[in-house]
């Protein structure tokens, strides 16, 4: 009567959501201040002031039909032109308006890309653990298969040997996400160079174009001046999937883009395939008012020092308590080794202390937990006693 | 290297878009006032004042994270509750918040529904000509087939005999669109009753649930007090796909819903399948700020008297010139018989007079043209001389 696959996707709530709901129930019992919910990756920095200003200005100066009317499917021409200029000025690239396809956020960008590039149900996209679990839903939902490369648990860059072995005659693309959810690590220039060399060699060897899908909503959430290499400059067949969810703190507004640079093989046709994929998925155009807001906000970022402060408090506190953590260079996640080795057991013990942590098994990285620190600083400070009690159970 | 199907969808521009672009080129040559562009169905009535008021109020009173943050995937709980109350008060239905899934507009609603309901690639959805051509893209893009029922060219209700013959053991659903794009006709209560009886009989006969997909973005655009029956009251297995594109003149903001009433067989599971379909298609949540705006604007409609005036001028003018038109009861389209019988030839002759009309062959109704009258009243008045010249070529 209905699609069994869709039913399963719709009825199986994500473990993260379940934990979040549990947190709300607990808060009702023990008080909000006594529950330490580190489950969700929902930005807690307000949108920069330019967003509100741009909205108010648009409503005051521009006709309703222009503000709220359809834009062309690929997006407002002025916005696409502004994007090309902004990226060219910032990264020394040579993009133009017609490289950009404006989307309803990163999930849309990814689905459009997977749909556009998939030719056969044997096609595979490769995710590098730890990875955002929805990649599997998006890849499989668009007719391809997901293959997972095991994590490099030493420094959470890319396990190149494993990746090399994973690439085969069905490989359509490799997905990267840097700054990374859930590890907080940024892929170094060296990593990107090695990755590009590997993909070039493999493309030649296999006689097929291997795309690099760079999912980078956290690009601007980077600390201590660490460089986030602009991937298209290293590998020609790169597709960039971007979203303003994190940089402008607009996750609910569903606005982002797919970028298909001219350097991509058969670039125009790949772009057309993106247009067609979006059409088949039911994306008519990206939300029109926020397209116009973006024109006035390019290059702006919320005050990420708030996240940095959280990172510093949490990293210092947890390492002093004996936890083994990757020091996050970006995004707003801390990736912590589960004491005792079993992340499910570790998370249960934490939960008993009202510390809500996410086991990273779903991210392809068993034995670790993800702590989202896009939360109130005070909650982090209050939580330290619970972390202390948790550590004491293992010492 | 990429999906051939997506490439075709992305590179073949729609004939309507081509005509619209041609109109802009002609305007640059002969002057904007001498081109009569009736090609696009883009609302020309401003959004009602409540939209701007609600946006400004939200920005003044509510935190950035609450306005722009993720809502739950199925949509803001307060909005879904308000929708249930509004529809119950207006139509005497018995909906509740969990019958509603908020979407990025009608295209999203339709794609989600087709994806959720399709179990096998043999599954068929039936469209009743004349029909919105993107139905084919949405149905085929989600793995099913589209079957078309020929139009009832006498009064543009439903050709029940043809529909009865079209229903078979693969039929998953029937799509209706009333008020109709492109005919402007509203399906009468009698039509809906006959349709419901047919679908009930056929469901029983074939031993399968046949869904009625009611695509109704034009519901509120109805003139002269003509009733638009609320379809769920006539047929239990009705899925409603709605959008605020027309009623609130917000086509670019991508906001609408799917409604799965409790009366639907296995209703909760069908709803979960909708949730899963949305997830697989890359819809994370509907634009958050406009979800909150809707709460304050339910029941509001732009000033549709402007469309009605256009309809009256155009209908009177064209019939006096000898054109055979269906008198539109709703939406903002006039459906006109092509003089001479060949709509392509007729549209070419019109185009030579800078009258841009859309041949309805793509809508499954050869021999007719669609005239979108969501345009300036003055353009309609200026165009009458060109229509006169067009008619004279056939007399």
Image (spheres, coloured by chain):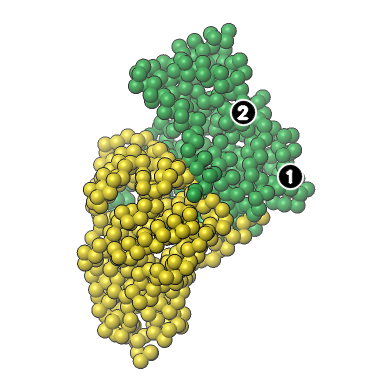
Chain colours: A yellow, B green
Q: Residue at x 56, y 46 (%)?
A: B141
Quick one: B275 or A140, which is closer to the camera?
Answer: A140
* Residue at the outermost bottom position: A395
Q: Are marks 2 and 1 on the same chain?
A: yes
Residue to which mark 2 is pinned = B365
User: Considering only order in the chain, which callout, 1 or 2, is on the residue closer to the N terminus?
Assistant: 1
Answer with the quarter of the image where residue B119 lies: bottom right
Q: Chain of mark 2?
A: B
In percent of width and height, residue B184 lies at 55, 29
Q: A383 or A126, which lies in front?
A: A126
Location of residue A99 in the rendering, given as x and y in whole percent from the top left corner: 36, 44
Q: Which residue is mark 1?
A: B168
Q: Position of residue A183 (x, y in %)?
A: 36, 70
| Mark 2 vs 1: CB contact within 8 A | no
Relative side of A137 to A82, left or right: right
Which residue is painted at 51% across and 12% down in the image?
B390
Q: Is B388 located above or below residue A95 in the figure?
A: above
In the image shown, does A96 or A60 lie closer to the viewer? A96
Compute the Cα span from label 2 to label 1. Answer: 23 Å
């Amino acid at each position: 009567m209905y699609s069994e696959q869709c039913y399963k996707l719709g009825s199986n709530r994500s473990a993260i959501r379940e934990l979040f709901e549990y947190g709300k129930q607990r808060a009702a019992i023990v008080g909000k201040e006594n529950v330490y919910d580190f489950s969700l990756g929902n930005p807690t920095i307000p949108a920069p002031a330019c967003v509100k200003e741009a909205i108010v200005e648009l409503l005051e100066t521009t006709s309703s039909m222009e503000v709220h009317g359809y834009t062309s499917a690929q997006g407002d021409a002025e916005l696409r032109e502004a994007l090309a200029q902004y990226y060219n000025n910032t990264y020394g690239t040579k993009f133009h308006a017609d490289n950009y396809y404006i989307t309803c956020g990163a999930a849309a960008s990814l689905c459009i890309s997977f749909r556009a590039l998939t030719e056969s149900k044997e096609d595979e996209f490769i995710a590098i653990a730890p990875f955002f679990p929805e990649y599997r839903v998006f890849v499989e939902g668009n007719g391809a298969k997901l293959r997972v490369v095991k994590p490099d648990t030493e420094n959470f860059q890319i396990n190149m040997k494993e990746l090399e072995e994973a690439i085969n005659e069905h490989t359509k693309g490799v997905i990267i996400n840097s700054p990374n959810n859930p590890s907080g690590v940024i892929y170094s220039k060296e990593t990107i160079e090695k990755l590009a060399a590997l993909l070039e060699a493999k493309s030649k060897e296999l006689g097929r174009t291997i795309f690099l899908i760079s999912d980078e909503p956290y690009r601007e959430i980077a600390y201590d001046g660490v460089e986030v290499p602009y991937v298209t400059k290293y590998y020609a067949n790169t597709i960039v999937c971007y979203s303003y969810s994190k940089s402008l703190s607009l996750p609910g507004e569903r606005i982002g883009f797919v970028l298909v640079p001219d350097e991509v093989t058969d670039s125009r046709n790949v772009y057309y395939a993106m247009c067609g994929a979006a059409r088949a998925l039911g994306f008519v155009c990206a939300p029109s008012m926020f397209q116009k807001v973006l024109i006035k906000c390019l290059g702006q970022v919320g005050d990420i020092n708030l996240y940095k402060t959280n990172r510093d408090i949490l990293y210092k506190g947890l390492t002093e308590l004996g936890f083994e953590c990757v020091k996050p260079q970006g995004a707003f996640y801390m990736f912590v080794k589960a004491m005792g080795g079993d992340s499910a057991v570790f998370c249960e013990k934490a939960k008993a202390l009202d510390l809500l942590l996410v086991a990273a098994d779903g991210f392809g990285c068993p034995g670790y937990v993800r702590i989202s620190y896009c939360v109130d600083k005070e909650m982090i400070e209050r939580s330290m006693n619970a972390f202390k009690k948790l550590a004491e159970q293992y010492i």
